[in-house]
Image (cartoon, rainbow, N blue to C red):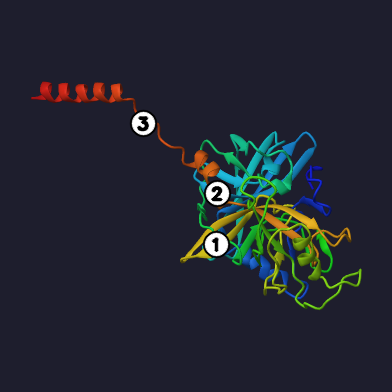
Amino acid sequence: MKKSILITAACLFASHFATAGVIRHDVNDNLYRTIGVLPQFDSVGAILFDTPAGGFICSGTVVARNWVLTAAHCVDEATTMTFYSPVFNEDRSGYYHQAYTATSWVWHENWTGNLLAGWDIGLMYFENGIDAPIANLYTGSNEAGAITTHVGYGATGTGLTGANQAAGTRRGGQNVVDGAYSTEGTGGQLLWSDFDHPDPTAVDSWGDVHNDWVNFWYNYFGYGFTSENAALPFEYAIAGGDSGGGAFIFENGEWLLAGVHSLGSNINGNNIRSDYGDLFASTRVSALQDWIYSYIRPASVPAPAGLLLILGGLLLLARRRKA
């Protein structure tokens, strides 16, 4: 975890930076690693960065030749930042990482460290560009109920143990977006998912059904949606090296970046992060697309009318001289 953070007083359960790329206990980890190296997710890479408190790892996604999208909490205290883009051999049986040093970085002006507010988004700029595939952004409004594929470099473990192994290995997994909620902005700037146990009747150390915690808290805090209480074949919870990584939706034949990994919540109060029954959220790309595009696709400034007249006159004069 990078640092302590401000949480709104209304939130009584513990929220924290995304801290585990955690998998089902009954599915082989190699399958999650295989999802992570599928070519449609080659835009995702690892981020190593230094702060006055030490060095850390996050993830990020290439969204333009010169830009990587990540979480605000990965950039707001950084003194140096390096993006590591995966480079695969021809048959994709192996890969290495090409390092790119960021020239500068920026985070949303409304970001204060409050994860539930929904402003946890940042960008890294690379003056000389990045030689990597570019992810297209999801700009629709149909995230709720969609299956998202999450890719990053987070710590891992299983839903029974929580995160108990180090970050740094590339993985991918899936979850369903239960709904969108944030305490600021549009009120829907975070995409929420829960980590379902494959057995919907399984109980935790408190003797409570794992998956019952989720809907209790969704209802208690008035999120306005519920969980289906059903684990996907590659059910997954995001990671502490996964922070800033990508949540992708497949729509109209295209994989689109819909979320930026932000936070996890230990809602069952057992001090095990990202075990079955916990929640996690990703910053909603569609809600903040204008901010993203203002950097990666800045609007061209129209030339003043007087300048256009002068240029027109010079062109006419040049034509006359040529004649």
> Mark 2 to mark 3: distance in Å?
28 Å
Q: Is residue 240 left or right of residue 134?
A: right
Q: Quadrant of the C terminus?
A: top left
Q: Earlier in the sequence, mark 3 or mark 1?
A: 1
Q: Is residue 150 left or right of residue 216?
A: left
Q: Which residue is mark 1?
A: 142
Q: Which residue is mark 2?
A: 62
Whole-percent x, y for residue 132 in the image: 52, 51
- Depth check: give the residue in front, 190 or 169: 190
User: SS at mark 3?
Assistant: loop
Query: Image height check: is 179 above or below 67?
Result: below
Q: Which residue is mark 3?
A: 302
Residue 219 got which mark?
A: none
Whether residue 166 can be seen here: no
| Image-quadrant location for residue 157 | bottom right
Tell me the residue at 69%/44% (across/down): 48
Residue type at mark 1 is: Asn
Q: Earlier in the sequence, mark 2 or mark 1?
A: 2
